[in-house]
Image (cartoon, rainbow, N blue to C red):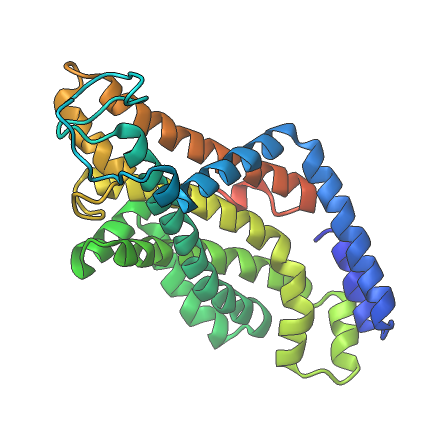
């Protein structure tokens, strides 16, 4: 927990007026923002990720021909007409990369949101309420955590089907234990803190204390875990698409493009290079942002935030 978060919580618990609490929160936010801006790698990563997101959002206007438009130039290298070359059906590689970025971002953020929405309440209840609220759910989390990340997603997709929705759901379920355990650890550390005890002594109910006092002070590590989960989701989604468990063809996906390029690796090496580079760049951006946020907001230690692969 950062010092700014502690000050905010103490001010709230001790009955400070709204203006004082807001001022403390504002000062803490400005300090975190300055720290984040001082992390050059994080700023560059965020800028590149924003550019990728903007290109993905406005893809239909930037690339009006669409990712399915075919031409007679099959397996052509980079040229003025096709900056990154074409695939075996004559489809423009750059167009498919841009539209594939949209799919990757949807899966990344969608999976992280699913993991957060399910995992944080489980961890908060387990850490703050304890007893059966802790024993039963956390044993289930331990079971899921014992399985490789990719295996959990693979089983869910194999059962439900291969589409973007099920892909998001599968990776999100695999991400739940990470959020749950991280939130539980933070709640355990906070439930006997002075400002939490003071809040209960002032007559606040357990639920009110848990939601209004404990939860806001667990947000720092949760935000970092969100970014880490999004990064892992990009890789897992590409891996599932590579083994034909992602969005079915002809939908553009970076993993699917890598799978198709495997057949033409020696005939047209450009085919596989560009999707691989795009995937590496996106993962690197998430990684830099995560490290920058971790330093800026004083999140949990590296060991508690490592994603399972």
Which quarter of the picture shows residue 202? Answer: bottom right
Which quarter of the picture shows residue 289? Answer: top right
The relative height of residue 226 versus residue 43 in the rendered view (above or below) is: below
Q: Residue at x 19, y 61 (%)?
A: 160
Report if residue 227 is visible in the image: yes
Question: Is 135 on the left or on the right of 46, as rendered?
Answer: left
Q: Residue at x 62, y 66 (%)?
A: 215
Q: Residue at x 22, y 47 (%)?
A: 246
- Quarter of the figure that contains the C terminus: top left
Q: From the top left corner, tell me how far across and down residue 237 is, in percent.
A: 30, 44
Question: Is 18 on the left or on the right of 306, as rendered?
Answer: right
Q: From the top left corner, tell me how far across and down residue 92 is, in percent.
A: 25, 29
Q: From the top left corner, tell me how far across and down residue 26 is, in percent.
A: 79, 56
Q: From the top left corner, tell me how far across and down residue 36 is, in percent.
A: 68, 39
Report if residue 308 is visible in the image: no
Q: Residue furthest top?
A: 266
Question: Is 219 on the left or on the right of 257, as rendered?
Answer: right
Q: Nearer the viewer, residue 152 or 285?
A: 285
Q: Residue at x 24, y 57 (%)?
A: 156
Q: Nearer the viewer, residue 255 or 302?
A: 255
């Amino acid at each position: 927990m950062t010092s700014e978060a502690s000050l905010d919580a103490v001010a709230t618990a001790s009955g400070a007026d709204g203006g004082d609490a807001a001022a403390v929160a504002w000062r803490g936010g400005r300090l975190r923002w300055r720290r984040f801006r001082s992390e050059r790698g994080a700023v560059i990563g965020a800028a590149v990720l924003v550019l990728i997101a903007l290109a993905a959002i406005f893809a239909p206007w930037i690339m009006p021909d669409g990712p399915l438009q075919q031409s007679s130039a099959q397996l052509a290298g980079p040229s003025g007409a096709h900056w990154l070359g074409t695939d075996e059906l004559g489809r423009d590689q750059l167009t498919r990369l841009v539209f594939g970025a949209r799919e990757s971002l949807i899966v990344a953020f969608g999976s992280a949101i699913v993991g957060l929405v399910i995992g944080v309440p489980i961890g908060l209840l387990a850490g703050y309420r304890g007893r059966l609220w802790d024993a039963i759910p956390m044993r289930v989390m331990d079971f899921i955590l014992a399985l490789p990340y990719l295996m959990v997603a693979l089983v869910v997709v194999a059962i439900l089907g291969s589409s973007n929705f099920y892909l998001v759901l599968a990776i999100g379920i695999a991400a739940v234990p990470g959020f749950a355990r991280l939130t539980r650890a933070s709640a355990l550390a906070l439930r006997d803190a002075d400002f939490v005890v003071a809040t209960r002594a002032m007559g606040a109910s357990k639920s009110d204390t848990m939601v209004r006092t404990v939860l806001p002070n667990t947000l720092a590590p949760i935000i970092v875990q969100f970014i880490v989960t999004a990064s892992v989701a990009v890789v897992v989604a590409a891996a599932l698409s590579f083994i034909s468990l992602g969005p079915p063809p002809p939908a553009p996906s970076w993993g699917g493009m890598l799978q198709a390029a495997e057949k033409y690796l020696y005939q047209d090496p450009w085919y596989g290079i560009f999707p691989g580079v795009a995937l590496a760049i996106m993962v690197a951006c998430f990684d830099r942002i995560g490290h920058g946020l971790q330093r800026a907001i004083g999140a949990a230690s590296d060991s508690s935030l490592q994603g399972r692969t």
